[in-house]
Amino acid sequence: VQLQASGGGSVQTGGSLRLSCTASEGSFSDYSDYSMGWFRHTPGKERECVSAISGSGGGTWYTYSVKGRFTISRDNAKNTVYLQMDSLKPEDTAVYYCAAAPNSRATYYFRAYEYSSWGQGTLVTVSS
């Protein structure tokens, strides 16, 4: 399974970015069987799950620090998950990774060990 994340960049505080993560053709027998998560990692800190979405798209989860600012969504016809990030803060600066967990059409996960496939990461830098 190959996941390609994109959309990172440099913005000022209060700015917005939209991350995308697309699964390569043929990677999934049925993309909607996989829940998707966005994680971020900053040197010196543990990797944390920012947001997750069930395979069907009907369930979502956000870590407390991004609630109301970030929105996760997915387009199963395009094998793509998105993370819309608004009102960005310097503490959002990190490398963001997407990940896929199998057998989770109706649920989602926020622990890294539950994800079996990972994208390469995209850097988000928020300056004050």
Image (cartoon, helix red, strand yellow):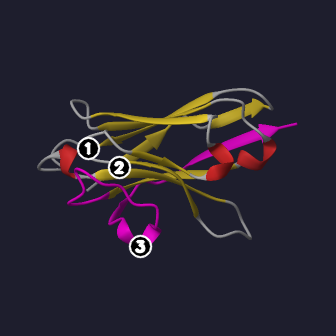
Looking at the image, which residue is at 19% across and 51% down? 33
Labelled pair 1, 3 in contact (Cβ < 8 Å) = no
Question: Magenta span covers which residues?
Answer: 101-128
Task: Give the answer, above or below, for where 12 lies relative to 111.
Answer: above
Q: Quadrant of residue 20?
A: top left
The residue that disc 3 covers is: 113
The residue that disc 2 covers is: 3
Along the line of sight, which residue is nearer the eye, 29 or 84? 84
Quadrant occupied by the N terminus = bottom left
Q: CA distance from mark 2 to mark 3?
A: 17 Å
Question: Around disc 1, counting alpha carbons within 10 Å, would you say few (fewer than 14), some (14 to 19), or many (20 or more)?
Answer: some
Looking at the image, which residue is at 25% across and 31% down? 78
Residue lying furthest left in this view? 29
The amino acid beneath tag 3 is Tyr
Along the line of sight, which residue is nearer the eye, 14 or 20? 14
Q: Quadrant of residue 86?
A: top right
Task: Give the answer, above or below, for where 47 lies relative to 8.
Answer: below
Q: Is residue 83 left or right of residue 94?
A: left
Label 1: element kind? loop
Q: Quadrant of residue 124?
A: top right
Labelled pair 2, 1 in contact (Cβ < 8 Å) = yes
* Badge 2 or badge 3: first in the primary sequence: 2
- Percent coordinates x, y for residue 38 in the rendering: 49, 50
- Percent coordinates x, y for residue 12 in the rendering: 80, 30
Q: CA distance from mark 1 to mark 3?
A: 22 Å
Q: CA distance from mark 2 to mark 1?
A: 6 Å
Quadrant occupied by the C terminus = top right
The amino acid beneath tag 1 is Ser
- Percent coordinates x, y for residue 48 in the rendering: 58, 62
* Badge 2 or badge 1: first in the primary sequence: 2
